[in-house]
Amino acid sequence: MAIVIPRALSALKSKMTDIRQDLHRHPELGFDEQRTAKIVASELRSYGLEVYEKIGVTGVVGILKSGDSNRAIGLRADMDALPIQETSPHDYPSQNNGVMHACGHDGHTAMLLGAACYLSNNLNFEGTVVFIFQPSEENGLGAKAMLKDDLFTKFPIDEIYGMHNLPGAPRNSFSTREGTICSSESLFEINIQARGGHSAMPQKGVDAILVGSEIVQALQHIVARKLDPSSGCVVSVTEFTTDGRRNVLPGNALLKGDVRARTPEDRTQIKSLMQRILDGIAHSHEVEIHFSFQTEFIETINSPEQTAASITVAKGLSDQVDGNRSPMSFSEDFALFSQAKPGCFILIGNGTEGLNGKPLHASDYDFNDEILTTGASYWASLVSERLPKQDIIKC
């Protein structure tokens, strides 16, 4: 059974709200979270934790120990904002022009700080909790930077957990699943080198727009005809630029796009199918096509034991828990952490109305402060569940 956190944690709601709204007023982009990191480090020190800064450029790690157990778990929150101009009408808008917390990382940070504060005063666990405040999640670079700084060597853990708010889901609900929870994201570029010419005499050259258009159409056949349509894979061309003019057929074209996949096997197959399509079109039109495919985020995969524990804890806090939700199409930098250690990534409902129901990355989205207590309670309950105190029997 999950351990329900005492009501005392609700007293931290005002503190968490103040922190969250302050961070919202002062958002910072990936690897530029200087002010945010200082606030996080200062708060953790005030709770009596060991604090380590500049792990992965601007990352912060807090350590809280209780008892003699060698077991340790990691809890991760992200800190960075997005290059978006805020249009939300609330009374704590971003003061940094063109930068906004449009994904709720301000709330994630506040919830984990709230849990650290509570646990530091209620050592109802035995072991070590490693609080990980990660930079640059949106760019898919922060986890890699922290791992490069030997995060798990300096701060050994047995397992790791992450949480993200989900607009459109009922407030304080939870959802997760064993296996793939978030898709991978791979970015591709296709550079077409054809032979331009006069728009009135297209037969004299090779029109790069025509070649590019054929490629766009062919790529859409991958998911529909080569992969199971229910696989959750997506292939999207998002940019198409050429060097053509009003009466000049382009000789060069550049296509850029995005691929989402839920398994490494599908991701690899998509890349192979794309290359085969491009080779065929290049041969048929006698042009050169250069192709690059770079995976920015791998699939986020939840481990069985850790997922079961997360669901148990969530059910102790909410009567709306979906333990077998569909995988999400968005990607998460947490994937690198859960690849290195067994873990679970869970979603908490942000609400369905007003700004709280707006999509992630929307300019009028806002994190719901009414879920701060539930989120912090989840973290504290999870610690008690995974690092239980051992009763000592004296003869």
Image (tube, rainbow, N blue to C red):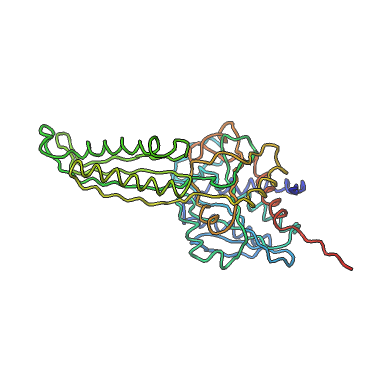
Above-or-below relation of 217 to 119: above
In the image, what residue occupies the spot 46% across and 46% down? 82
Tag count: 0
Location of residue 139 in the rendering, given as x and y in whole percent from the top left corner: 44, 51
Where, quadrant-wise, is the C terminus in this rendering? Answer: bottom right
Is 229 situated left or right of 326 in this image?
A: left
Q: Is residue 296 above or below residue 240?
A: below
Q: Position of residue 230 (x, y in %)?
A: 47, 36
Nearer to the camera, 184 or 285: 285
The answer to which of 62 and 240 lies nearer the viewer is 240
**Whole-percent x, y for residue 227 in the image:** 41, 39
| Viewer-side residue, 221 vs 290 | 221
Name above or below for residue 377 compared with residue 341.
above
Residue furthest right in the image = 395
Q: Residue 6 location, x and y as percent?
A: 77, 48
- Which residue sits at x=51%, y=45%? 182
Q: Which residue is depicted at the point 65% across and 38% down? A: 173
